[in-house]
Amino acid sequence: MKTKELAHWMRQEHEKVHTLSEKLQEKAAICPRTNQGRWIQDVRQAFDHLRAHLIKHMALEEQDGYMLCVVEQRPALSREVERLASEHAALAHLMDEIHRELGDLRPEDHLLILDCCRRIQNLLQYVERHERDENLLVLTAFTNDIGTKD
């Protein structure tokens, strides 16, 4: 993917992730005292939608080499690219665990519902930070003038 294509695609994808994250955040922000069964169902649906999108999103980012154009432009950023690439596996692992937990939740599991809410909120913060770091990395690689020797 070329530089402009990558930047445009990342912006569109991050907007989609942001929209899906907001929907899930609304549901996970308030743990219900009644109608827990319906709440669990709604959260599962919103979470599964975000999870499916993120899995596809990360696979597409990695398809031709994760941030290859960034490393080609600025080899010094390869460590940061590697760190962000490794976060994909960690995020996928966290999403798998939350997905499993949501699948096991029952309306009477009050403490587990609270824990699940907290885990979802933490995940959303990790995703937001990860995407912010990706955006910053692309901006740094293609907009910072590091100068050249004369």
Image (cartoon, rainbow, N blue to C red):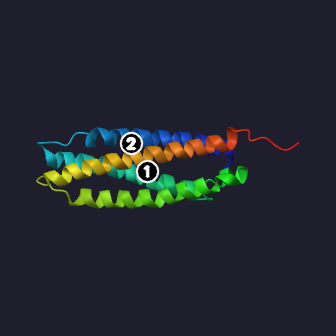
> Residue 114 at what x, y percent from top left?
20, 49
Mark 1 highlights which residue? 53
Would you say 147 lies left or right of 131 here?
Answer: right
**For numbered disc 2, what is the local secondary structure?**
helix
Marks 2 and 1 close (CB-CB < 8 Å): yes
Badge number at residue 82? none
Report the Cα–Cα distance between label 2 and label 1: 9 Å
Query: Relative to the observer, which residue lies in front, 76 or 50?
Result: 76
Taking the spot 72% from the left edge, 49% from the top edge, the residue there is 73
Q: Amino acid at mark 2?
A: Leu
Mark 2 highlights which residue? 20
Query: Relative to the observer, which residue lies in front, 146 or 43?
Result: 146
> Residue 53 at what x, y percent from top left?
43, 50
Most extreme residue toward the right is 150
Would you say 80 lies left or right of 50 here?
Answer: right
Q: Amino acid at mark 1?
A: His
Quarter the C terminus occupies:
top right
> Residue 6 at what x, y percent from top left?
62, 46
Would you say 5 lies left or right of 148 here?
Answer: left
